[in-house]
Image (spheres, grey):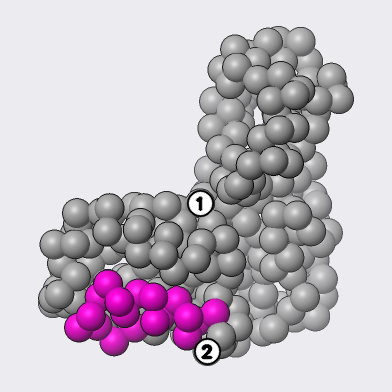
Amino acid sequence: MIAVVYSGSKSAFWKISSEGKTIAECTIAGINPCFNDPKHILYLLNKEITLINHAERIKKIYAFVAGTSSPGMQESLAHTLGQFFRNSKIKVNDDLYGASIAACYNQSGIVGILGSGANCAYFDGKRPEQNNFGLGYILGDEGSANYLGKILLKQYLEDKLPQDLKKQFEERYNVDRPLILERIYKKPNVQNYLSSFLEFYIDKRNNKYIEQLIDQAFERYFSTYLMPTVKQHPGQEIHFVGTVAGTFQDRLRLVAQRHDVHIITITKEPIHNLLHYYSN
């Protein structure tokens, strides 16, 4: 029995397989070790009955987790998971590696992540190329759910939202300027708070103003991540992975056309491809 987990900062998706067949799955809060200490990660695992019921029988775990690009973070998370899954051999890689496998399998290509966070890399069929991206929700993540939440709040706080959207936003979230600033600057898990506003984009996706915000965010992603990578690796097929890419793939493909870029695949939930890859 094997388990595969793909985790951003907001959510961790688990699938458990036996003899090539999925026998269980669940979603828990993200287990990014940059934001969650071992005690909290174990607390999250011990809350999920699906994981508790299968923990002793799982022999291998392939974990792809945001915030584990360094060997030290990978070893630390593997040790933490090993305290819960005591009979498992555990391999930890970062989410960019997982996204690359899910999109390309063993082929080369350029892989973009647009989920709760953002990243991009050339994948040679074995490993993603090292880059200077992956700066997180404060310094980076352009185009991601974090970023979309940030620009929506900024538009609201600067009184730039159209009145109809402003009213709908206030009614839905029951917020005002002091409450937002307190939540951003005085409370934990800011990245999850920012990502939570993705639902507003989804509900209002046909609003022209919301479309403009999405397109502007994707333009920032292309200029910051994708086009520099394409310039370094011309002729490579381009793939996208993540909730934001999958949810707004119509807008993403339109922005790509403006840059004369053809996107081969968009995978909203990479966990399915990862399980297939490691089950066969």
Is 279 on the left-hand or right-hand side of 251? left
Q: Earlier in the sequence, mark 1 or mark 2?
A: 1
Predominant secondary structure, magenta span: helix
Q: Is residue 244 visible?
A: no
Residue 60 position by quadrant: bottom left
Is 202 on the left-hand or right-hand side of 17? right
| Residue depicted at x 56% and y 17% | 172
Residue segment shown in magenta:
73-90
Quick one: SS at disc 1?
A: loop
Residue 270 horizontal/vertical position (percent): 43, 63
Q: Is residue 228 visible?
A: yes
Residue 177 horizontal/vertical position (percent): 76, 23
| Residue depicted at x 60% and y 47% | 188
Question: Could you tell me the amino acid type at mark 1?
Answer: Lys
Is 130 on the left-hand or right-hand side of 244? right
Q: Residues within 10 Å of mark 1 (few under 14, many from 20)?
A: many
Residue occupied by mark 1: 10
Residue occupied by mark 2: 126
Marks 1 and 2 close (CB-CB < 8 Å): no
